[in-house]
Amino acid sequence: MKPSGRENERTSLHGASRRQAKAMAARTILWMDLRTTLSEPDLCSSLPKSYSAQRVRQLRELLPAVQSRCPWAVCFEYDVPDDSGLEALAEVKRHHPALPIVMLTERHAKTLANWAFRRCVWDYVVKPVSVRYLCRCLTSIDKAAPPAERPGRQVLTAAGPMPSLSGTSLSVPSLSGTSLAGKPYQRTTLAPAVSYVAANYPEKLRLATAASLCDLSPFQFSRNFKKENGFTFRDFVVRVRIQRAAELMRQSAVSVTEAAFVVGFNDLSYFARMFRRQLGVSPSHYRNEKEERSEVRSAPWSDPRQLPLFPPEE
């Protein structure tokens, strides 16, 4: 007997509900709360219902909870990280290398950020931070590799949004199964170098340091980076800095000179040449015309969000 239209509709709704329930289940977040000073409401309890945050406060419960609840991601929240709390994060990563981990901390230091990225955390976030920003961080996991496309938790690594010196969040591209040039990505090679740039782009960056983070010699690192991406590590650093400068000028009232120095350039003429090469317009033109972006968008890569940090292989 042919089902009626109402039965078809009911079946469709049930199917949609099951799919929605599956998606919701895939977004269970295990929240390791390691704060020494508790306050309410907090980030964990303020997350929207699209995330099911399950709080854990005892370190001895962490690994069993990860094993039994199969979370979509784990958030480690600290005020001042201590050795036992950091070791717990590292241990989860050792046992579950494909599990995305977001690290939230009130205390920030370059050494702490480097430690986190060496362990391939998904995102390193300095508090205070809004719930909306945290949701953007979590959304970046989906954008990189939706749960439906991650059977068995395929290996994922990324450098998510990093806080700038001014407190403004600036996003960096994620790595999820592909290399910078769109080829199959080997997470053991370049991810620490990309994270190093994301965390330290305003400062002087050394190729030797990036190579050491990847457990490669400078020669091997340079050869592998150029081979995998089609451009050099130095070119990548310049691309990141130009994108950040464009974002600063688009989102705030900083001058061209201020933007150049904030992101790590100390030569304005070189900054202007690189900016024009990447965005197709001079930085002063971009800055002056930011409210009339329709004129600037006719230039190639005029929107900094479209800057080809990771261009496809030609």
Image (tube, rainbow, N blue to C red):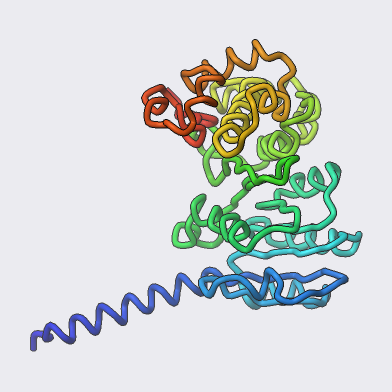
Seen in the image, is 8 located left or right of residue 97? Answer: left
For residue 224, say whether it is visible.
no
Q: Residue at x 55, y 71 (%)?
A: 48
Seen in the image, is 219 located left or right of residue 314? Answer: right
Indicate the quadrant containing the C terminus: top left, top right, bottom left or bottom right: top left
Estimate the x, y position of residue 201 in percent, counting from the top left.
Answer: 72, 32
- The residue furthest bottom is 1
Estimate the x, y position of residue 144 in percent, counting from the top left.
Answer: 51, 50
For residue 228, say whether it is visible.
yes
Seen in the image, is 266 located left or right of residue 242? Answer: right
- The residue furthest right is 83
Estimate the x, y position of residue 224 in percent, counting from the top left.
Answer: 64, 25
Q: Residue at x 31, y 77 (%)?
A: 15
Judging depth in this view, the residue of 296 and 291 nearest the camera is 291
Indicate the quadrant containing the N terminus: top left, top right, bottom left or bottom right: bottom left
Q: Residue at x 55, y 53 (%)?
A: 140
Q: Quadrant of residue 170?
A: top right
In the image, is residue 169 above or below residue 105? Answer: above
Q: Residue at x 36, y 79 (%)?
A: 17
Judging depth in this view, the residue of 146 and 275 nearest the camera is 275
- The residue furthest left is 1
Q: Quadrant of residue 57?
A: bottom right
Estimate the x, y position of residue 214 in percent, counting from the top left.
Answer: 74, 35
In the image, is residue 132 above or below residue 66? Answer: above
**Number of labelled discs?**
0
